Image (cartoon, rainbow, N blue to C red):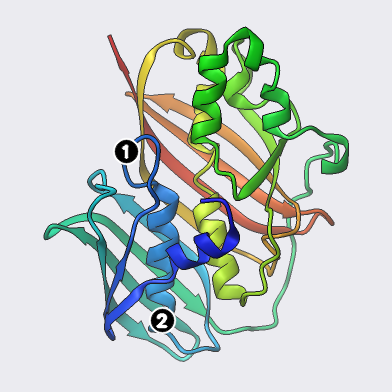
Amino acid sequence: MVSSKELVDLLTLEKKSDQHYEGRNYKTPWGRVFGGQVLGQSLYAAYQTVPEDRIAHSMHGYFILGGDINIPIDYHVDNIRNGRSFTTRRVVAFQSGKAIFNMAASFHIKEEGESHQIQMPNVLTPDLLLTDIQQAEGLQEKDPERFQRMMKYHPQIFEFKPVDKAIYLQTRNSAPLAHIWFRIKDKINGNLALQHQILAFASDYSLLLSATLPHREKLMNAKVYYASLDHALWFHRDFNIDDWLLYAIESPSASNARGFSRGSIFNKSGVMVASVTQEGLMREYK
């Protein structure tokens, strides 16, 4: 996937009925359905069933089974409640008759109210930073096989500028903190619903990997199976996904072969636009 049109096409599901939608899969190099794809597609399905004056303010998803990239995904929407201010939906994703993902989303009308937020971390701006690909260029000669593997896994439609060294390039243990600027490379003219769906897709990158930072010396050359278990996203304020956004990530805990991470997302002006949490499997093979 190299263009925003390809991503928008991926997130745009085929309508089978008012409560049933079907989506195709991003052909990932690792051979399983990408969690961000399911997050974005399930949010698309839910959005099709709510009034136009309602926007998503939160979504909570559980990954039940690994998805097969060769089988389309069926999304079934349950209209839980239509209230005066809030609309609640449940979306279950199926492959071959088995549920692989379950998500609840809530939508809210625009309302006036009190406003506050935490301060954006004081970090270098993206114009002063290298992309993660530029950081990795030194590997072309030192470890060309690893470099090619990294490039194969890299989502070409997004641009990432880590404030420090990219997590996948780090070889020393460090505090479980990461700051990464990101944006989609092409201009997006879609409405806020589409912005939400693309952010849901992108929010799955780097989040779980931050839980490996205190363990890089052990895990970087180990055989480790990574998989999202659950993922929650809150939309606080409007944003544009083609403008630079700062993903401020921390991993407060890792235990029992699971890593837990949470992130705050800010625009370049320091406005907090979203919050994310995720727990994922980090199972090392002996």
Q: In this view, does 95 lie to the left or right of 160?
A: left
Q: Are discs 1 and 2 less than 8 Å apart at CB?
A: no
**Amino acid under label 1?**
Gly
Query: Which image quadrant for residue 186?
Result: bottom right
Q: Residues within 10 Å of mark 1 (few under 14, many from 20)?
A: few
Q: Is mark 2 on a helix, strand or loop?
A: loop
- Expressed as whole percent of the image width and height from the top left, the position of residue 281 reads 34, 31
Mark 2: amino acid: Gln
Q: How crowded is mark 2: few (under 14 residues within 10 Å), some or many (20 or more)?
A: some
Q: Mark 1 points at which residue?
A: 31
Separation (CA) of disc 1 from disc 2: 29 Å
Residue drawn at point x = 50 percent, y = 86 percent = 85
Residue 189 in view here: yes
Circle 2 residue: 48
Residue 124 image point, x, y percent: 85, 36
153 or 267: nearer the eye?
Answer: 153
Looking at the image, tell me whether mark 1 or mark 2 is earlier in sequence order: 1
Residue at x 66%, y 68% (from the top left corner): 188
Q: Is residue 213 above or below residue 269?
A: above
Residue visible at 75% across and 62% down in the picture: 116
